[in-house]
Image: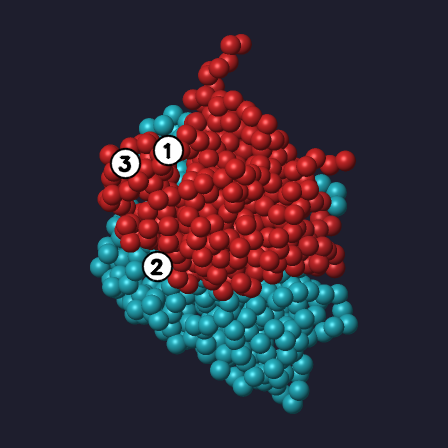
Amino acid sequence: MTDLPDFNAMTDADFRALARDFVETNYPDIPRYTLGRLHWDEVKPWYLVLSEHGWICPTWPREHGGMGLTAGKHLILIEEFERYGAARVNDIGPVMLGPLLLKYGTEAQKAEFLPKILSGEHVWAQGYSEPGAGSDLAAVRCEAVLEGGDWVINGQKTWCTLGMDANWIFILARTDKTVKKQAGISFLLVPMDAPGVTTRNIENLEREAEFCEVFFDDVRVPADHIVGGVNEGWTAAKALLGHERVFIGAPRLSAAAMTRLKRIALRAGVWHDPVFRDRYVALQCDVADLGDLFETYVDKLRGGQTIGADVAMLKIFQSELYQRISELMMEVAGEEAGLAQAPEGDRQLHAAATWLSARPTTIFGGSTEIMRNMLAKAILELPS
Amino acid sequence: MSEEWVENARMIVESARAIVPADGSLERVRKVRFEGPGYDRAVMQEAGELGLFLMRVEEEAGGLGLGMRETCELARVLGRGLLPEPVLAAIMAGAMLQGSMPEEAMTGAQVITWAWQDALGSLGWKGGADGGRIKGTKQAVQGAAGADLFAVLTDQGVALLPRDAVTLQTAESLDGGQLCTISFDSEAEILPCPTAQSVLEDATLAHSAYLLGLSERALEITLEYLRVRKQFDRPIGSFQSLQHRATEMKVSLELSRAAIFATARRFDTGADALTRARGAARVKLRAAELAMHVSREAIQMHGAMGITDEADIGLFVRKAMSEANLFGSPRLLRARLAELLDEGDAA
Ligand SMILES: Cc1cc2nc3c(=O)[nH]c(=O)nc-3n(C[C@H](O)[C@H](O)[C@H](O)COP(=O)(O)OP(=O)(O)OC[C@H]3O[C@@H](n4cnc5c(N)ncnc54)[C@H](O)[C@@H]3O)c2cc1C
């Protein structure tokens, strides 16, 4: 989009008003305030609207079709979309692959893949984890061997979020078995319709197929489908630490959960119970304090500073706080806590949905245990 | 030399093996969930034929006259196997009806359950009986979706209603069963039931033992996972942070077990009303918190595997979520204990 205004030149208030108006005007007739992820066929209209207006990749530079937003403006955009309850689009292309290609991709790769992310023609899945490589990601075994100008891939990936909707997947593959684990990994781009790729859906605890396994059986991709050089995949994947990882620690999820908790308490008739209030207020303080801590990071971003490893503190506190709120919800909901469906069809009153949706937040994107290990070492400088 | 109840419990558990496989297979449990009433009526018949529903019927009334320790031991084993059938509810119906328990309910030819709770989020029952009629609503009636007979509690006593005398409202629960409400307005004979309050306390205790069994098995499965799952070339169970948290679960489990069986002993040897009321609330409070504690940790320690429906640990988590708040949520039980704080306490 060539006629986009200079968003960063706008005041925050003006940009906020613009973002609010944008989502209110353009949000299609699809669900809002969903706790789980929507599949591509449901969320596609929203993706396409964002795409048409040039709003699908807020952080990409404008010359590549992004909005070129600063971190501060991006945050406002996220806030306004979330306030409206806009569904999260399949953003692995815009959020993960795009920035990585911008940094490590060849000009040809950028020209080939970026426009197709922007248009929604390519929907991407992330293929890092394997059955044997979770927290220990460097242990990946899925193998790629160069053979007659093609990478030949054999192995398995798993837990690919919305992988069943994707037509492309990026993977970490073992390309050298003779060196230190991290030094023998490459980053490859694979079309899901290549011969030899098969998937199997996995139902999550809410009995919805939100992730899948992907199997590679002599799958061939051209040699130039590698990003960042042979055996450089680990560096590329690890360097993918955009400012987005700050937002995973934003207090919004918890703040919204507090509103639901209040409604559940009202329904259960305990909103005025002093014992309940004692616990509610303690959680409310946690949410507020998290908000303040979060702001210190956002301020750093606004000031152009980079964010260090210590940002993991935000993710730990936010995800566990969200879980603690969901736990109080379960208690307060009483017998209704055990319902499979929302009471009276009102998702806000469904304690179990929040409890279940809060579980993975301490597992994906680096489990809380791994983050604590990392903080103890990198920030507290404790001996190993 | 072990006490008599230990031998009785052993025999009961032995016979319950027919309905709860010793190998811990959950295949059947998985199959019946989200189907029909969420359990298998044929298994209720088997349980009836094994005499389980006679456990709390006095010997003079043709029952087994067993105690709460035996009942809790059975409940624990049922919980380990996540048995979906309303066996405990049928036992409690027997406890209320005693000699009036219909033959076909005793044998399991007909599925019987009991209904006591007037309103969600509360722990009692009031009227409903007037002359020869009963009228009202009962909540969270266990197994109601597949039951033929309902032993309904009123302040005048207990009434036995056939299926066609009740209107059933169901809502699917997370474990794949049904949370049921029944409504009724019909003529019925009201049988006196002076022990109604203690049956509720017994049921609370038995339910706690079910949660104990569930937690015990969920912990075992998690410990097994910690032993076999390797990351960083080591079993994840070798990481000290996980070891400490596994230990915390074990401590909660043993506190719960001790409290349940000590309380059951007090019940069996004649505790006063206040001791019973406090005991039931305390034990249930602990068991509910245990089940949710183990559920949270079990998921976390299983990593993404814990987020899947195909891993068996999820069956335990869903059951815990469905049942932890029956017979009072921890919040309600703490409030109940607070009410009892100054009662009968001279000191
Ligand atoms: C909802 C969801 C979506 C996901 N989406 C994707 C995706 O799109 N693409 C993708 O590639 N992956 C995805 N993942 C996978 C995710 O990255 C992994 O789950 C994560 O890396 C943890 O690995 P694991 O599940 O194998 O757990 P494991 O590594 O087996 O860990 C099991 C438990 O052991 C703990 N543990 C492990 N090592 C240590 C240690 N050294 N010290 C202390 N404790 C330790 C863990 O914290 C955890 O509690 C997703 C996961 C979830 C839950």
Residue closest to the eye, B314 or B206: B206
What residue is pinned by disc 2?
A87
Query: Which amino acid, by three-letter code, is at mark 3?
Result: Gly
Q: Position of residue A359 (x, y in %)?
A: 50, 51
Q: Is residue B344 left or right of residue B123?
A: right
Give the side of residue B340 with respect to residue B55, left or right. Answer: left
Image quadrant of residue A136? bottom right
Q: Are marks 2 and 3 on the same chain?
A: no
Q: CA distance from mark 1 to mark 2?
A: 58 Å
The chain to which mark 3 is attached is B
Q: Chain of mark 1?
A: B
Q: CA distance from mark 1 to mark 3?
A: 14 Å
Helix, strand or loop at mark 2: loop
Q: Residues within 10 Å of mark 3 (few under 14, many from 20)?
A: many
Please determine whether, in this image, residue A222 is positioned above or below residue B308: below
- Between the residue at mark 2 and the residue at mark 3, the CA separation in whole angstroms equals 48 Å
Discs 2, 3 touching: Cβ within 8 Å: no
Q: Which residue is mark 3?
A: B128
SS assignment at label 1: loop
For residue B63, above or below residue A178: above
Task: Name the residue rendered at 33%, 68% in the picture.
Answer: A42
Q: Chain A appears in which tint?
A: cyan
Pinpoint residue A1: horizontal percent, then vertical percent.
Answer: 31, 69
> Which color has been applied to chain B in this rendered view?
red
Nearest-to-viewer mark from 1 and 3: 1
